[in-house]
Amino acid sequence: MTTSPVPTAVPEPDTASRAQFEAIPGYLDGAEAAGLEHFELETRLRGDGQDRLRTLMQEHFGLRALREVGLQGIVDTQGVPHVRVEPDHARNLTTTFGDAAVRRLAYRHRGQSNLHPADAALNLPREQYSHCLRQLAAIEAILNLRALRANGDFAAYRDYHRAQERHRRHKVR
């Protein structure tokens, strides 16, 4: 039996979080912000901004989950039909803004892995970390290696890590 959840009404995004986000300019105009040094102000804005952006992203994922409509004819790569549909299957996604839960429909067949077409629509990675977070990690790694080369420390860094790898592989157990 195929179940296809259909939202009865298209929900609107949460206006409370948008009001929180729009409160930032009001804070900047206030006396408290006027008394902060630039480091304190930047730290406060980074924290508030990141948290509000994470909240907006989370709400967007929630809105997409509510709007997701069941599909017919879902089959896996072996051609096995997945006709049982269950709502509210969640997975964690760690983003540059923080953790967010992505809820979506799961298409099931006994003895087979669940299928989640919404994951493909969002182009979610298989693992927990978002593409943007992975990109930042790669950029940081490149910058660190460039700094090691520029300081003349790269050979020592390479030799140390090669020795650690040899030790790990040939560790007496």
Image: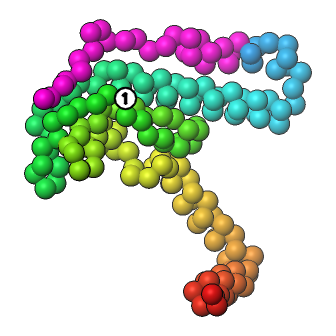
Seen in the image, is 134 located left or right of residue 65?
right
Residue sitting at 39 percent across and 52 percent down? 126
Q: Please determine whether, in this image, residue 36 is positioned above or below residue 97.
A: above
Q: Can you say whether 137 is above or below 33 in the image?
A: below
Rendering coords of residue 53 (x, y %): 57, 29
Examine the rendering and report whether any part of residue 121 can be seen.
no
**How far across and down, in percent of the image, does residue 100 sit?**
51, 35
SS class, disc 1: strand
From the image, tell me which residue sits under label 1.
88
Q: Nearer the viewer, residue 34 or 18?
A: 18
| Along the viewing direction, whichever of 69 and 148 lies nearer the viewer | 69
**What's the amino acid at mark 1?**
Asp
User: For the residue carrying disc 1, how many other residues have a C-alpha within 10 Å: few (<14), some (14-19), or many (20+)?
Assistant: few
- So how many labels did they put on this image? 1
Quarter-wise, where is residue 107 in the image?
top left
What residue lies at 23% left-to-right and 32% top-to-bottom?
Answer: 85
